[in-house]
Image (cartoon, rainbow, N blue to C red):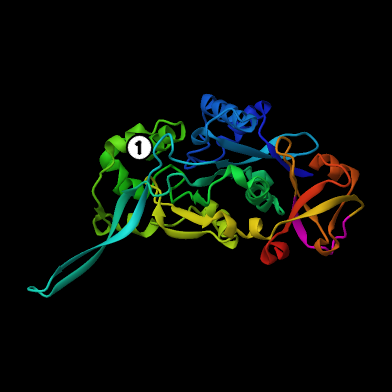
Amino acid sequence: MMVIRPVERDDLAQLLALAGKTGGGLTSLPADSDTLKARIERSLLTWQGSLPRSEQGYVFVLADSEDNRAVGICAIEVAVGLQDPWYNFRVGTQVHASKELNVYASLPTLSLSNDHTGSSELCTLFLDPDYRTGKNGYLLSKSRFMFMANFREHFTQHVVAEMRGISDEQGHSPFWDSVGSHFFSMPFTQADFLSGTGQKAFIAELMPKHPLYIHYLSDAAQKVIGEVHPHTAPARAVLEAEGFRYQHYIDIFDGGPTLECEIDRIRAIRKSQLLTAEAGEAAETWPLCLVANTDYQRFRVILLPVDIDSGVVQLTDSQRAALCCNDGDALRVVTLCREENKA
């Protein structure tokens, strides 16, 4: 049985192996042992309530209940940009006009922005390719909404998610080649790694403070603005089904889109409800649901058919053990989207 749980120190080796399978481009999961170890420690301190809001971040893993091995990772940053600046480009417009010459030009631009400072961020979503079967991807991505619904007071009103942009298997990004390379004088993979390991000061020091005209970029760079890597397209579809939208903000390195939504408008949060755990066995005809316990320290999520109208969740002994719950406990439940239940 696949279960979402908080990250543990013993997960370091598995997370390092996962990082090696990303192919680059996932800045929050670098193949660097020290960085990943520090990320785990920061998550544990967040759960302990030992960090200020500006440093808080939760990390979860997808594990097989039989051997507890981490095969996927997802995370939530509580409030970005309160300690280190959080940058992206805002895609906007500048108008140049002259009545005398009868000239009117509306030109798209890129402007360095900190507009999402203080937002909660969904990040670090990656699933081992060997486990991209069934509904594992839905479980991994949407489990974060169950945690946010349970513990709403820990998060802010606005939620964002940076999507991985276009780059090839050799780590070349057409957006970087046309923009970042001119200011940073380093390969995309190196800048990506530095950012992922927390060395972000160079962004503020070297990025231009004035708007960039998109028409000056290469055709290849213009085409990938706001586009996601093919491997990230399913993750984008999952978030859009929950209400997230692209509002013309992109990553400064690869041009990937930033999706955003108000926390109370996220479908899984808005429609989730509390039901009661009860001994029994689910019928396969019932809709597949995300089922989470309400235990902050031992948070767990699994996928399970549930008859929501009954007011109870029928659980076998193994399912109760996976959820760390007992009969009579409150469980937060929400169905997958209709299309996801059919897939």
As helix, strand or loop, the secondary structure at mark 1 comes to: loop
Quadrant including the N terminus: top right
Magenta span contains residue 290: yes
Percent position of residue 230, x then y: 51, 54
Residue where numbered disc 1 is placed = 187
Q: Nearer the viewer, residue 277 or 211?
A: 277
Please tell me in which quadrant of the rendered image residue 195 appears: top left
Can residue 185 be seen in this snapshot?
no
Percent position of residue 64, x then y: 75, 39
Residue at the image position 65 percent from the left and 45 percent from the top:
151
Residue stretch in magenta: 282-291
Residue at the image position 64 percent from the left and 55 percent from the top:
269
Circle 1 crowding by C-alpha within 10 Å: few under 14, some 14–19, many from 20: some
Instruction: Give the farthest residue toward the front.
Output: 153
Percent position of residue 304, x then y: 79, 53
Residue at the image position 63 percent from the left and 60 percent from the top:
267
Instruction: Give the farthest residue toward the right.
Output: 280
Please tell me in which quadrant of the rendered image residue 233 appears: bottom right
Residue at the image position 72 percent from the left and 63 percent from the top:
341
Magenta span contains residue 216: no
